[in-house]
Image (cartoon, rainbow, N blue to C red):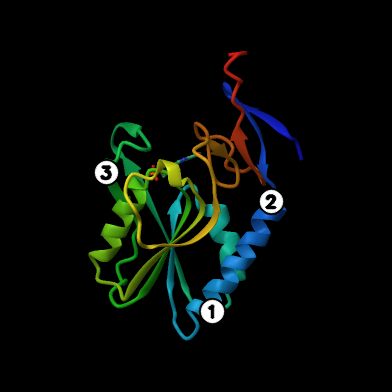
Amino acid sequence: MTNQIQIADKTFELFLENHTISKRTRLIGIQLNIDYEDKCPIFIGVLNGSFLFMADLLKEVEIPCEIGFIRVSSYDGAESSGKIKETFGLPDHLHNRDVIIVEDIVDTGFTLNYVINEVKKQKPASVKVCSLLFKPAALKAPIEELEYTGFEIANEFVVGYGLDYDGLGRNLKDIYREKTVPADLG
Ligand code: IMP
């Protein structure tokens, strides 16, 4: 395990170790097993970022459940432009089902708002969101459905455990945050 890594032009420092993420994930799993006891929810992972969290989380879920993935893309390639273009692969049998959307991170919340609206068009019985990370200071509009959060973090750029910088870093076991240069040195 390295404390500092370089990806393209950015330097990152270790922030959340894999064992810390695992412990928190186990607790969320226990909570889900309680909250959805006697139900058969559908977990929908938002790709690409959620792929590792989704896999580890679902290993902790012991109730019967279905699993699907969706992918969203935004106009202009800008992650937080607020203009989401298309959804790929959203399951079409969500009517009267309990849906749990699984995200890597909630930043502005634009992506999630779009996905929640798409899911609601099918009139599910319930919709909740489970996100590994949440940046409250970056959120543009409240998300009532955000029920399960792994870690609330400051408005910093993070990478690893599914999250990328310029397509890189998703395979890192731990989460790193961008190292900022003190103003007087920068
Ligand atoms: P939102 O629509 O602004 O909430 O952005 C959500 C998406 O932006 C996430 O699913 C990530 O793909 C990406 N994102 C937001 N913040 C970060 C970050 O700190 N590191 C890497 N990706 C991020």
> Does 115 sit above or below residue 64?
above
Crowd tier of the residue under label 3, counting other residues whose Cα lies within 10 Å: few below 14, some 14–19, many 20 or above: few
Q: Residue furthest top?
A: 185
**Image quarter (top left, top right, bottom left or bottom right) of the N terminus:** top right
Percent of width and height locating residue 130: 47, 61
Where is mark 1, residue-wise?
34
Where is mark 3, residue-wise?
85
How far, Cα to Cα, is label 1 from label 3?
A: 36 Å
Crowd tier of the residue under label 2, counting other residues whose Cα lies within 10 Å: few below 14, some 14–19, many 20 or above: some
Residue shown at 29% from the left, 52% from the top: 114
**Image quarter (top left, top right, bottom left or bottom right) of the C terminus:** top right
Of the two numbered discs 2 and 1 on the same chain, state the one appearing first in sequence.
Answer: 2
Q: Is the residue indicated by label 2 positioned so its CB lies within 8 Å of ligand 1?
A: no
Residue shown at 34% from the left, 76% from the top: 97
| Residue 53 disc label | none
* Type of amino acid at the residue the image marks with label 2: Asn
